[in-house]
Amino acid sequence: MGDFSQEGDRLSRVPGPPQTAPWNPEGDAERLWNSALQEPHLDALPRVTCPNHPDAILVEDYRAGDMICPECGLVVGDRVIDVGSEWRTFSNDKATKDPSRVGDSQNPLLSDGDLSTMIGKGTGAASFDEFGNSKYQNRRTMSSSDRAMMNAFKEITTMADRINLPRNIVDRTNNLFKQVYEQKSLKGRANDAIASACLYIACRQEGVPRTFKEICAVSRISKKEIGRCFKLILKALETSVDLITTGDFMSRFCSNLCLPKQVQMAATHIARKAVELDLVPGRSPISVAAAAIYMASQASAEKRTQKEIGDIAGVADVTIRQSYRLIYPRAPDLFPTDFKFDTPVDKLPQL
């Protein structure tokens, strides 16, 4: 009897089915409606499952595009689109760095967004006709205007890379070239000359100006032609650029000359005071900056010759001497008060 009572107690403690409260039409309906609004059910989304094994994780056959149940082998879905990245290398392009065939990013500067099909160069006999001409050409898929702008964009990128210009200047240059090209206001001018002038304008608008000689050194266009296109573009676009000052070039010139910070600050102070005192009327900021660097370096332990400064600044030795002669008489007033002289002011070279 005791065993039966213990067994009965054990059976009585077995949890039975959950007890449900009687249905309340008004309160339960409102509670279910509020819970449905607050907690969205993810199970309501359509999901591909096996009808015989709904909890089984389907296996995808990427080659055939099938979704297969691992329990019974039933093909639940066929011709499934693979949304992942496509990485495939063909036999004739194993040396390529990027095996992706999705193409470049969209280019809003081109008419079709640069989403046209580009056909690679054929290598087999089927790619050429009986006369040896290629059967498939890109000329049919790209307009002449887009082709000209693409070539100009490549030239702009090449020039910017040679003088280490950032991407934002390249983008501004491309926009300027597109505006000029669509206006057709510089007909008869070479696209390379227009691109070089646009690069010069973009540098000045972004606050990192470069000289005409620096732009000319990385392009195939003469300095005079770049200057002409520069004036025509400013007139056509009705835009302007800030005036260049000696401070725009000072840090770059001194860095290329490996001069210390003290000499750079002294040269900046000398050039600014010379302009404020109107000692160099009519002189370009580049020549004034070169003369100020020469004076500051000669007064310090890190001396530089006129030729070294001229090669970096892109000015002739005689130009540096002419600007130096104009500021030399007021040299004591030009140096900052905390400058440590290695050579006294009265011992500076008289050119």
Image (cartoon, rainbow, N blue to C red):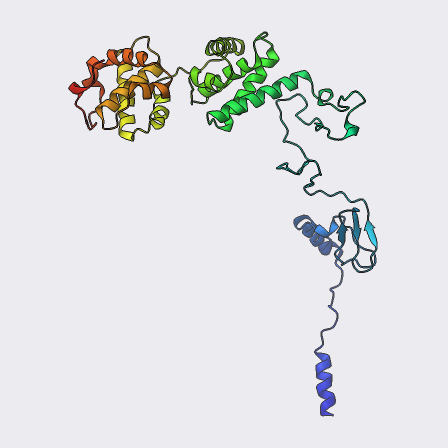
339 or 52, which lies in front? 339
Residue 31 placed where, x, y %? 69, 54
Quick check: 310 left or right of 337?
right
Residue 334 placed where, x, y %? 22, 19
Query: Which residue lies at the image location 65% right of the left edge and 49% below the top edge?
Result: 38
Specify the farthest residue to the bottom. Answer: 1
Q: Quadrant of the N terminus?
A: bottom right
Location of residue 177 with respect to 76 vertically, above or below: above
113 or 350, which lies in front? 350
Quick check: 342 left or right of 146?
left
Residue 326 placed where, x, y %? 25, 11
Location of residue 185 with respect to 84 vertically, above or below: above
Res 144 → quadrant: top right
Quick check: 5 left or right of 221?
right
Query: Which residue lies at the image location 62% right of the left edge and 26% below the top edge?
Result: 107
Query: Which residue lies at the image location 28% right of the left edge and 13% below the top edge?
Result: 321
Res 138 → quadrant: top right
259 or 50, which lies in front? 259
Q: Quadrant of the C terminus?
A: top left
Counting labels gives 0
Is residue 169 visible in the rendered structure shown here? no
